Image (cartoon, coloured by chain):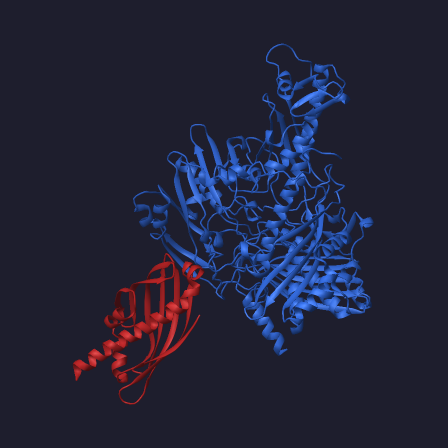
Chain colours: A blue, B red
């Protein structure tokens, strides 16, 4: 289809405002008489609260209020489960323990809030924190996820009698029978450690209760403004129409900002209503390390059964997942791991079992990739081990096991995060492999370049992995499209935006339908007064789900335009053209009417209208997919390892990616770049280190390393397109694509570079130190 | 965190023991000590200020002496907390005679540190801790020399 705007590499509408500091972020909100809040957070991972004396803090000039959990009375209660437990899975065990507003009797992770100070300035509030005398009795912390499940371990919840939060077993086929017939069975023990999301903007909140209008306005860095409004109004006993949540420009979400009814939100909205004054809270970076949700810590025991010619007969994976002190986000992370492990391969027999443990650490919720990268890491490591054992080229063993393009839709039989048996809608994995190998010149590298460089003493290696990304899951999103009298178009949708370029990609979808320039389409996201139905921005679903809803609304508006223009211009609808913000006859272009003029005609100020007529050129529509659209791709990476300093340089990074129909290749490139940077971080830089007492040891960017620009490779992207049959636009998500395959490709490439040493990578994240240790171990083994 | 080390004092064991058990001397020799007062025979309370990298930490806490075998050994238990975190430590101190005028102090112990002090200052805790201990011993040794000089 010939398009003018859709699918074009168009610069982002929002960038001039963001880049020149003209965009509104939460911290830019300034209100008269606004107070400032800060939280006293526990230094102990596990402790009993004997008493908290706030009298000195209250006496400090400028302090307006100090509250502890006890001051909240009946308002204090554990928050709701944000994602339901997957009861669709037979035999699932799920022990619910959700986050509390502030710790009341017992502290269960370092950083858990125990008091809040509200003062005339943040400075005063911070000083007053030191005035609070908290008598805390340290208890034995539960730190190690495996030990947490052993008998005799200290307990995070005494009343539960166990640290087991969940137990899930799923099987498709019969792994044991398959393994019994296999020529080879290969096992691996794999450890995935913790990391943060590390958004540039930490969490922020401004709450304003206006006692006269009885209305609460909340500016929040949330990925789910509508869920936040609906939930807060319920918690506070207000009507939903009394609460407006605005998620303005947000400096990165990456998952944790999907968390709603966070302690700060629940406490400060309540406090604002009590005090009748607006309150601002901006999380600082040190707090972010201790208070924002994190991801990972999984320990896998995996195995793969194959025939001697490298055909997969079955895969078995048994793992433990650390959920931290709460499981408010239920099982999304381990379920994503479970559904993404087999990925692009045909695995006739698959057994997967996981146990989730409570520990005295920050709760685990999705971070970009959301469990998927670890399933991919486990599977790709198994494939690499199998290739080695069977003497096959790593790319060949993959090629022999891909699902073929004609096998879709493919049912894996495993229930995923949307509680339905997983179906891969479409894809062409062999094509992504071919494309990636061609781009990185695989044959030339392994046959000529690598031997040449090795002869010069250089440790260069290549890694090639294929992955899938379940994206665009339900339930639904909506959009409203309105043509204004100026001829410009406004669009509103419920999803929030944290930098994904929605203001441009959604505008392109509408511009294409209505024949207006992209910059004349003004998009509003994440303001519940503008649009108040929807679920939020997560699981790479914005473009797919909201994009299709907006497309549907724009199509309805287009139909209204054609109908009214046909009547006005006396030209049949099929002879009308919408372009350059006007409607004209295809054969007689001078017979035309500007779009704005038509919008005025559609909204007459006097006179009579036909029965059933709706005013204006406006429509609202919704879209909900039957199940998620599966994106995928292949990454090929060349690295060089400096065996003196143990630095790893990514010399080339190629990704052949398929996210169906692309709305804007520039934005897709940007999404991939961001994802790759997180993936590189998870491969070699980012690791939260705790000591045996549960104390975080690297809670600053001095010690917790995120990749810098100089650590990033130049990313070469090949776009392929297998449109999703599930939605009219054929879109699949791309938000997590770069993050998912990178650690697996990195591990393979590093191993290949150090082939002389017979070193095996069974963990992420690595670091120069850790790689040095592995190298030393390989020398002595 | 494990603590271990030794320091050679220029004085007889009895004298070294006496100054180690004198709170007024201890208050001058633990760097950053603002107050240290004896609350009963084996318990002291005090306040200390420590700077570790970017963290300026004021602590209030308690020091307890137990398992005393004068002038040979004792166990010290310290607990402190403040806005920047907390520290809890147990140390065992042994004094060995090295001839008639020298005493070797050996210590082993375990230190638990938490809060901002750990998450921000972790990289520097070790070196700051060692330097504090050494400075402390040097000051003690000087005090010891002054006392011995006054006696002779």
Left or right for A242, reference A182: left
- Can residue A110 be spotted in the picture? yes
Q: Position of residue B84 (x, y in %)?
A: 38, 58
Total label count? 0
Q: In front here: A595 or A363?
A: A595
The C terminus of chain A is located in which quarter?
bottom right
Q: Position of residue A723 (x, y in %)?
A: 75, 42
Q: In front here: A125 or A311?
A: A311
Q: Position of residue A492 (x, y in %)?
A: 60, 32
- Can residue A300 be spotted in the picture? no
The residue at the point 24 percent across, 76 percent down is B142
Q: In front here: A554 or A622?
A: A554
Extreme residue toward the top, this view:
A607
The residue at the point 69 percent across, 65 percent down is A449
Residue A388: quarter of image: bottom right
Q: Position of residue A400 (x, y in %)?
A: 80, 60
Left or right for B64, reference A285: left
The N terminus of chain A is located in which quarter?
top right
Q: In front here: A523 or A14?
A: A14
Residue A357: quarter of image: bottom right
């Amino acid at each position: 289809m010939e398009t003018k705007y859709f699918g074009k590499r168009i610069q982002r509408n929002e960038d001039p405002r963001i880049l020149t500091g003209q965009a509104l972020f939460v911290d830019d909100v300034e209100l008269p008489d606004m107070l400032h809040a800060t939280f006293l957070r526990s230094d102990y991972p596990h402790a009993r609260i004997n008493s908290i004396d706030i009298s000195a803090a209250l006496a400090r000039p400028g302090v307006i209020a100090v509250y502890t959990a006890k001051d909240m009375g009946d308002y204090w209660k554990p928050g709701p489960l944000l994602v339901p437990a997957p009861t669709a899975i037979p035999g699932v065990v799920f022990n619910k323990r959700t986050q509390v507003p502030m710790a009341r009797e017992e502290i269960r992770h370092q950083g858990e809030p125990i008091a809040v100070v509200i003062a005339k300035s943040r400075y005063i509030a911070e000083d007053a924190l030191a005035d609070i005398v908290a008598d805390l009795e340290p208890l034995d912390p539960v730190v190690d996820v495996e030990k947490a499940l052993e008998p005799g371990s200290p307990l995070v919840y005494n009343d539960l009698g166990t640290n087991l939060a969940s137990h899930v077993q799923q099987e498709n086929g019969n792994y044991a029978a398959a393994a019994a017939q296999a020529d080879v069975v290969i096992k691996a023990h794999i450890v995935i450690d913790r990391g943060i999301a590390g958004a540039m903007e930490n969490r922020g909140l401004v709450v304003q209760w206006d006692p006269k209008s009885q209305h609460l306005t909340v500016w929040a860095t949330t990925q789910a403004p509508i869920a936040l409004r609906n939930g807060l109004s319920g918690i506070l006993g207000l009507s939903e129409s009394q609460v407006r949540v605005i998620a303005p420009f947000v400096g990165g979400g990456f998952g944790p900002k999907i968390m709603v009814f966070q302690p700060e939100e629940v406490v400060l909205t309540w406090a604002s209503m009590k005090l009748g004054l607006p309150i601002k809270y901006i999380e600082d970076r040190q707090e972010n390390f201790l208070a924002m949700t994190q991801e990972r810590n999984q320990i896998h025991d995996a195995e793969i059964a194959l025939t001697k010619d490298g055909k997969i007969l079955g895969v078995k994976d048994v793992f433990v997942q650390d959920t931290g002190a709460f499981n408010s986000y239920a099982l999304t992370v381990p379920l994503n791991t479970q559904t993404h492990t087999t990925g692009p391969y045909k695995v006739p027999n698959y057994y997967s079992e996981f146990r989730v443990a409570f520990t005295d650490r920050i709760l685990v919720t999705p971070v970009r990739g959301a469990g998927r990268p670890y399933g991919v890491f486990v599977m790709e490591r198994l494939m690499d081990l199998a290739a080695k054992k069977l003497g096959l080229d790593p790319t060949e063993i993959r090629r022999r096991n891909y699902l073929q393009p004609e096998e879709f839709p493919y049912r894996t039989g495993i229930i995923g995060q949307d509680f339905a048996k997983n179906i891969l809608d479409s894809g062409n994995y062999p094509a992504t492999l071919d494309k990636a190998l061609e781009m990185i010149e695989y044959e030339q590298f392994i046959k000529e370049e690598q031997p040449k460089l090795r002869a010069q003493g250089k440790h260069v290696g290549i890694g090639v992995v294929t992955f899938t990304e379940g994206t665009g899951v339900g339930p639904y999103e909506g959009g409203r499209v309105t043509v204004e009298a100026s001829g410009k178009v406004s669009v509103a949708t419920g999803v929030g935006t944290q930098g994904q370029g929605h203001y441009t990609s959604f505008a392109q979808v509408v511009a294409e339908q209505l024949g207006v320039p992209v910059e004349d389409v003004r998009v509003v996201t994440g303001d519940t007064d503008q649009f108040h139905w929807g679920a939020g921005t997560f699981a790479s679903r914005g473009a797919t789900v909201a994009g299709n809803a907006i497309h549907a609304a724009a199509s309805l508006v287009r139909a209204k335009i054609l109908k009214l223009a046909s009547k006005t211009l006396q030209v049949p609808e099929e002879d009308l053209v919408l372009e350059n913000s006007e409607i004209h006859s295809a054969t007689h272009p001078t017979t035309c009417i500007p779009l704005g003029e038509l919008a005025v005609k559609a909204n007459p100020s006097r006179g009579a209208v036909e029965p059933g007529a709706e005013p204006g050129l406006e429509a609202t529509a919704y879209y909900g997919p039957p199940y998620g659209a599966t994106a995928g791709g292949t990454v090929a990476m060349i690295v060089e390892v400096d065996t003196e300093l143990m630095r790893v340089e990514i010399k080339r990074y190629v990704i052949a990616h398929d996210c169906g129909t692309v709305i804007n290749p520039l934005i897709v490139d940007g999404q991939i770049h961001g994802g790759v940077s997180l993936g590189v971080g998870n491969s070699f830089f980012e690791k939260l280190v705790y000591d045996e007492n549960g104390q975080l040891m690297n809670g600053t960017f001095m010690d917790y390393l995120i990749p810098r620009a100089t650590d990033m490779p130049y990313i070469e992207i090949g776009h392929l397109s297998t449109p999703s049959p599930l939605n009219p636009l054929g879109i699949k998500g791309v938000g997590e694509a770069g993050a998912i395959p990178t650690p697996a490709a990195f591990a393979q490439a590093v191993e290949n570079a150090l082939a002389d040493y017979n070193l095996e990578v069974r963990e992420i994240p690595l670091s120069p130190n850790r790689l040095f240790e592995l190298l030393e171990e390989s020398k002595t083994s | 965190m494990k603590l271990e080390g030794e320091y050679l004092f220029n004085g007889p064991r009895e004298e070294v023991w006496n100054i180690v058990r004198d709170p007024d001397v201890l208050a001058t020799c633990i760097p950053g000590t603002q107050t240290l007062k004896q609350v009963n025979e084996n318990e002291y309370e005090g306040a200390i200020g420590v700077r570790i990298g970017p963290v300026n930490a004021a602590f209030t806490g308690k020091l307890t002496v137990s398992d005393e075998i004068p002038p040979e050994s004792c166990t010290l238990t310290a607990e402190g907390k403040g806005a920047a975190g907390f520290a809890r430590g147990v140390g065992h101190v042994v004094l060995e005679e090295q001839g008639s005028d020298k005493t070797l102090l050996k210590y082993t112990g375990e230190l638990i540190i938490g809060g901002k002090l750990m998450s921000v200052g972790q990289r520097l805790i070790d070196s700051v801790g060692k330097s504090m201990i050494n400075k402390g011993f040097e000051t003690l040794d000087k005090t010891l020399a002054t006392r011995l000089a006054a006696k002779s």
